[in-house]
Amino acid sequence: MQQRIKLLISWLVSEGFAKNQEDLGRSIGINSKSYLSQLISGKKNNEELVNKLIDIDKRISKTWLLTGEGSMLNNNTSSVVQNNYQGNNVNGGSSVIEEKSDKEYLEIIKKQSEQLSKSQQQIDRLLTLLENK
C-alpha cells in the first residue's frame, strides 16, 4: 500500500493539488513532516492518511489505494478539489466539479460566445471614441 500512497501523492502534486509532499500534508492537516513520513511508510497506522487523501478528490478509488485492485481513479464521478498552491479555490472549503452533458457544454459555450461578442462591441465603441478625440 505504501507504493500506491506514494504514487497517489506524486499524482496529486503533478495535478497541482500541492507543490510537494510536505505541502500536501499541510493541506490535509498533517503539519509534521516526520509524522507524514511515518504515515506514508506505514510505520504509523495510515488509515487517517488514506481517508484524507481520498477526501482531496472523490475520483480516487479507496479500493485501489487499499488493495491495488482496479484503477487509481474511479470513472464518472464528480470530483471535490481542495485549495491548491496555484491559488484555485482560495476562499476556502471545497469546490464540486460536476460533469455535464454535451448539450449543457454547448449551451455554456453559446453564452460565453455571446458575452465575448458584446465585450468586443464595447471595445470597438471605446476605440472609436478615443480615435475621434
Image (spheres, rainbow, N blue to C red):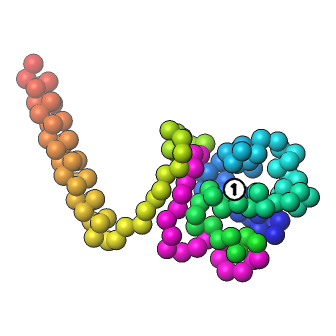
The amino acid pointed to by label 1 is: Lys
Question: Which residue is outermost to the bottom?
Answer: 69
Q: Is residue 19 visible?
A: no
Residue 75 percent coordinates (x, y): 54, 75
Local SS, label 1: helix
Quarter occupied by the C terminus: top left
Foreground of the two, 47 or 70: 47
Whether residue 21 is visible here, answered yes or no, is yes
Q: Which one is nearer the viewer's eye here, 12 or 44?
A: 44
Please identify the residue farthest to the right as the structure is shown.
43
**Residue drawn at 32 percent across, 71 percent down:** 102
Q: Nearer the viewer, residue 119 or 79?
A: 79
Magenta stretch: dominant SS?
loop
Q: Quadrant of residue 2?
A: bottom right
- Residue 121, given in percent of the width and then of the height, sits at 14, 41
Label 1 crowding class (10 Å Cα cut-off): few <14, some 14-19, many 20+? Answer: some
Q: Is residue 126 above or below residue 82?
A: above
Residue at (31, 65) in percent of width and height:
105
Q: Quadrant of the N terminus?
A: bottom right
Q: Which residues are magenta?
A: 67-84
Residue underneath mark 1? 52
Residue 133 included in the magenta stretch of the image: no
Q: What residue lies at 10% left-to-right and 26% top-to-bottom?
A: 129
Q: Give coordinates of residue 86: x percent, y percent.
A: 56, 43
Q: In x, y percent, where is residue 9? A: 72, 58
Q: Quadrant of residue 27?
A: top right
Rendered view: 73 above or below 35: below
Which residue occupies 50% across, 44% down?
Answer: 89
